[in-house]
Amino acid sequence: MGSIKEDRFLYERKLLEDEKLYPIAGVDEAGRGPLAGPVTVAAVILPKAWIKEGMPESLREVNDSKKLSEVVRERLYNELQAHPEVIKSVVMLSSEQIDQLNILRATHQGMLLALEGLVKQGCVPQHVLVDGCDVKAITYPHTALVKGDAKSYSIAAASILAKVERDHVMMEYDKQWPEYGFAQHKGYGTETHRAALKKYGLCPIHRRTFVHLEEQGELNLF
């Protein structure tokens, strides 16, 4: 199995063996920081057998989505989506919802909705592993893991699903508003994106509050 440091089922296994808890859901988001587009949240339940015996060889590269190449992310995404024993739920909150709620509340609402999506499939999480800091809005017993997408396969799987689904949506938006280059930067505040904003102004998927705060030098995501 390798060292404890390398064991990315460590937290799941302790919950399963010590506290007899299952299903265990991993939750992560993508798109918290961009100036445009939705924030996407995924919740994933991996099979109990994988927690006990190890990740299947074809999925052992599952990791923090930011550490994976686009090609590897897409392959792992397709395998996770196609596997009948992987229970998953992905939700998106629009730029309008982000402006109404603020990004923190929108992300937390997305987590609740994603977990509800698992329940609707007949899988009520007995414990939730969430990337980052504690989320008081989550009504299920949960553990917050800083950099959890690099520590837990469940969180990492959610990270990949959220990232790839959001990327796909941003590439579709690029077809509607090609002048902004969404296919390349996915809505993040790159120099190219800022130049397009200066030239063309806002389009319907821009987060008005984000653009305003960035212009004022006051954008704070935490």
Image: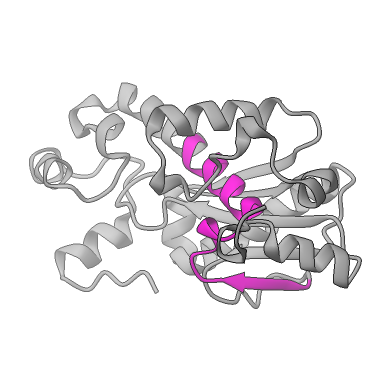
What percent of the width, then of the height, locates residue 190? 18, 47
Q: Residue at x 24, y 67 (%)?
A: 213
In the displayed image of the protein, which residue is found farthest to the top?
A: 175
**Residue 219 vertical position relative to residue 124 in the rendered view, above or below:** below
Nearest the viewer among 39 and 211 is 39
Nearest the viewer among 85 and 208 is 85
Q: Is residue 110 visible?
A: no
Left or right of 143 on screen, residue 160? left
Q: Quadrant of the C terminus?
A: bottom left
Q: Residue at x 69, y 57 (%)?
A: 9
Q: Quadrant of residue 203?
A: top left
Nearest the viewer among 23 and 41 is 23
Left or right of 70 on screen, residue 109? right
What percent of the width, then of the height, locates residue 136? 65, 78
Which colour assignment does the render follow? Answer: one colour
The number of numbered discs placed on residues in the rendered structure image is 0
Q: Residue at x 57, y 50 (%)?
A: 156
Which range of residues does the magenta coloring cover? 141-164
Q: Main secondary structure of the magenta part?
A: helix
Left or right of 173 on screen, residue 61? right
User: Is 149 included in the stretch rendered in magenta?
Assistant: yes
User: Is 111 included in the stretch rendered in magenta?
Assistant: no
Q: Quadrant of residue 178?
A: top left
Q: Is residue 181 visible?
A: yes
**Residue 108 vertical position relative to residue 82 in the rendered view, above or below:** below
What percent of the width, then of the height, locates residue 57? 64, 33
Left or right of 37 on screen, residue 57? right
Nearest the viewer among 92 and 126 is 126
